[in-house]
Structure formats: C-alpha cells, structure tokens
Amino acid sequence: MAANTDVSLFTDVTYEVENGLATITINRPDRYNAFRAQTVDELVKSFKKAWVSPDVGVVCLTGAGDKAFCTGGDQKQRMETGDYGPSDSGLFEIESLHRVVRDIPKPVIAAVNGFAVGGGHVLHLICDLSIASETAILGQNGPRVGSFDAGLGTGYLARVVGEKRAREIWFLCRRYSAAQAYDWGLVNKVVAPDKLREEVRAWADEILLLSPTALKVLKQSLNADTEQFVSLGNLAYTSLKLFGETEEAREGITAFNEKRPPNFGAYRTS
C-alpha cells in the first residue's frame, strides 16, 4: 500500500497555509506533543510539501495547545512496544526530519508555545529562528530516561550557546525559562503567549519581502559550517539503537513511566 501523502488525512500533524506562511503543527496535545514514528513521517511529508509549494515562502513549526511545543519521543509508546511504533518505511525517520528542516530552502520559524524538552528541544534548535512564549520551558531529558541526542543536538547546540552552557544543558537536564533561553541565545525573541502567532506572522511577512533565491543560498551557506554534525548524528543514532537494548536504558524509561528517580548506580563502571 502506498504511503499516505494527503495532509488532510494526517492524524498527528496539521498543515495549513496562509499568505505565504505554512504552519506545521504537532497535534498530540494529550501526549504533550511527543512524537511517535507516525508523527515523524507526517512531519517529514509536511515539510516536503512546503518545500515544493510555490505559495509557501516561510514555514512555522509549533505544537497544538498551550502546554507544549514538543516533548521529544513518546516515552509511553516506547515503554509499551519497545520502539516508537510503525512507520511508512519501517525506519524511525528522526534523522530524516532533522535533515529536511535544515535542507528546506525556506526559513523555518519555531513557535515555542510551552515545553520544548528532549527531542523537542532539538527540533526547535535546528529551526532557523525560534520565537518563544513567556511560558515556554526548554531543556534536555535524554540522560534522565536512558537516551541521548548527539550530532546536531550537541555540536550545533554548543555553536549556539557555547561549550560550557551546552554541557550544562545535557549534564544536568535542568529546565530553563524563555527569558533564560533568550539570554543564552537559544531563542530570538520572547513574547506574551497570546502574541506568539502574531509575532511569527510579523517575522514571516518581513521575510516574504525578500529574495527567495538569496535566502536559499544564505541558508545553505550558514548550514555548511555545521554540516559535519549531521554525520555525527547518524553515528550517534546507531549507538543509540544499540544502547536502547541495554538494561541501563530500560531502567531509564521504566523509571520515567513509573514516575520515580532512575537508579543508574550499577552502571557507573569503566
């Protein structure tokens, strides 16, 4: 059976276009917009649709509701089935999603409307611009649940905020306010929650006045300097798949779902 490419039939993502701005929304508010494999497939297809659409000049990525932008991989799904569920290709296409966000020759704005943690934090990070609600909470979560995101999630993060801050973000798994994220250069602007979409619209309108070819070449030029992190991310994902089968990783996800602190003491060996 051919993969579904009709965005109107998507279940996890919504896609809409208005005056040159395509808004792609992760639509799983009951799971704090955490993604499963199907969500990732639909996001990739949505970005590709925006890529080839002549009526789109800017893309906005956001989450449904006001509680979360995205909280990364669906850990309940991971606990239930051991993976993130079925996908069109049989692969969990998270690296393809990162790739298409970077490669689409149109500026991508993250509208961060709540929690952006774990894989959701990486998603906002790799967008070209990030505008955050004052209620946004940002941070990493991988080491807490027996996971990690290397490549863009680490190397590119260090380019954005600096080595010391990137290590703090990963090694402590703290939560940061929108104001702190702005101070560190993680987001471009912070606005009141009810002004978030309006601000994205204003930025998009400014961008839409500019040469699309010039923007395309500029984005590709800016990406070139950090392209090596994509290959490192592929290497890290291979390691993550192997690590995910270990007892240490299982302890992380079990503790998360049981709402208790993980006990990693037995794994502190050389």
Image: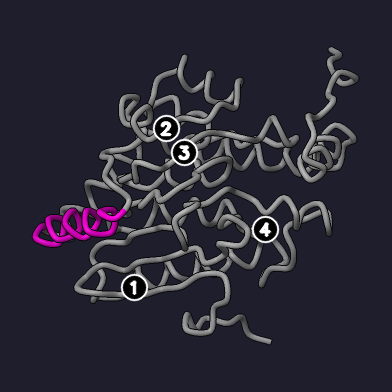
Closer to us: mark 4 or mark 3?
Answer: 3
| For marks 3 and 1 on the same chain, the one whose residue lies earlier in the sequence | 1
Q: Are marks 4 and 3 in contact (CB under 8 Å)?
A: no
Residue 57 lies in quadrant: bottom left
Give SS at disc 1: helix
Q: Residues within 10 Å of mark 3 (few under 14, many from 20)?
A: many
Q: Are marks 3 and 2 in contact (CB under 8 Å)?
A: yes
Q: Between residue 62 and residue 225, name the one nearer to us.
A: 62
Label 4 – label 3 distance at C-alpha: 26 Å
Q: Residues within 10 Å of mark 2 (few under 14, many from 20)?
A: some
Give SS at disc 2: strand
Label 1 – label 2 distance at C-alpha: 36 Å
Q: Which mark is residue 52?
A: 1
Decide if residue 102 is on the left or right side of residue 96.
left
Task: Give the labeled residue for mark 3.
Answer: 137
Q: Which mark is residue 92?
A: 4
Tag 1: residue type? Val
Task: Give the labeled residue for mark 2.
Answer: 177
Task: Estimate the x, y position of residue 29 in percent, counting from the top left.
Answer: 55, 62
| For marks 1 and 4 on the same chain, the one whose residue lies earlier in the sequence | 1
Give SS at disc 4: loop
Q: Between residue 79 and residue 5, name the one nearer to us.
A: 79
Q: Quadrant of the N terminus?
A: bottom right
Q: Is residue 200 magenta?
A: yes
Q: Identify the residue at image location x=52%, y=36%.
A: 153
| For marks 1 and 2 on the same chain, the one whose residue lies earlier in the sequence | 1
Start-end of magenta stretch: 194-210
Tag 2: residue type? Ser
Task: Estimate the x, y position of residue 58 in percent, counting from the top left.
Answer: 26, 61
